[in-house]
Amino acid sequence: MQEEELPLPTGVHAKHGSWYLVQRNQWRKLCRVADGRAKLYERLEEVSGGIDGSVWHAILEYRKRGMSQLAPATRKHYANTALRMLHHFGHFQLEELVPTHAAQFLKWCRENNRATTGNREKAFMSSVYEFALGEGWCSSNPWRGVRRNKERPSRQYVEHETLTAEIDRAPPALQPLLAVAYLTGIRQTDLRLARRKQITLAGLVVDESKTGKRNVHEITKTVRRFLNQAMTRAPASEFIFTSARGLPWSEWGLQSALRRFGAAFRFRDLRAKAQTDRPDADVLGHVGQLRERYHRRRKLSAVK
């Protein structure tokens, strides 16, 4: 729907390019129309305190009070997703949305080459409704039971020759990071935040930022070599991996450095390569079908 076709919340009117909340013939400016629906609902929440039964109020309250038990990475992702969902569904009442709306939204995502993103947005909206159910604002969750879009697992596999060549040409600050990422299968965020105190006699202890699970990764001779290489670059730092200036990697600083380096593979492909190269070992801590998702190449035996 176009912006001008979307209905406005009760009491909100547009005038001279801005949205106003009109109460008892008093016009209180909320924001410019050009600021978008997400900003409108955020300002309306601040001014009115919210309207129970509205989707926009449920989304904002879930973002404020309902995500404390989620992993930090999920909270960050959902905070951004909330802004898009405010635009798409904020004008609805909770009881107005039915499974048909959810299915049509997923169909629209599929037809606009954002099928996977649509699945993540569906999960967010389902969580919003579960939160609203607990608050007594609605009686059902229209997102529950609606079939997700089919996702095609990646088949990208980093050849060993490519990996070794790229690690050899990588700048000193990135070389040990890429090597340990492959050898252990640890996610980028967890490596960026890894501290020296996490290196123990049992192994490298990592609390996964995505799942909250504690893993103890084996420190082989090769892993230790690259860990030592990383730590000798900034002896005074409490972090294992540091930037070219000897400072802890920020999220955007690392992303910028990786873009400048321009590796022939994506960083996340190293995690899949780690499990693929050791199918007989528990590299990532996954079991069953979840582990199978990381197998990018299988070697099968003949009958005889």
Image (spheres, rainbow, N blue to C red):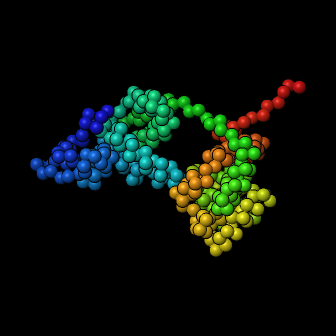
Depth check: give the residue in front, 70 or 121: 121
Depth check: give the residue in front, 99 or 157: 157
Q: Is residue 212 visible?
A: no
Q: Please identify the quarter of the rendering in which residue 196 is found.
A: bottom right
In the current view of this chain or complex, which residue is farthest to the right?
A: 304
Residue at 65 percent of width and 65 percent of height: 240
Q: Is residue 302 visible?
A: yes
Q: Please identify the quarter of the rendering in which residue 160 is found.
A: top right
Q: As drawn, is 214 to the left or to the right of 256? A: right
Q: Position of residue 25 (x, y in %)?
A: 10, 48
Location of residue 25 with respect to 238 vertically, above or below: above
Residue at 76 percent of width and 41 percent of height: 279
Residue at 21 percent of width and 48 percent of height: 18
Q: As drawn, is 186 to the left or to the right of 26? A: right
Q: Position of residue 70 (x, y in %)?
A: 50, 51
Q: Position of residue 253 (x, y in %)?
A: 54, 59
Depth check: give the residue in front, 29 or 229: 229
In the current view of this chain or complex, which residue is farthest to the left?
A: 25
Count of picture labels: 0
In the current view of this chain or complex, which residue is farthest to the bottom?
A: 236
Quadrant containing the N terminus is: top left
Residue at 64 percent of width and 62 percent of height: 173
Quadrant containing the C terminus is: top right
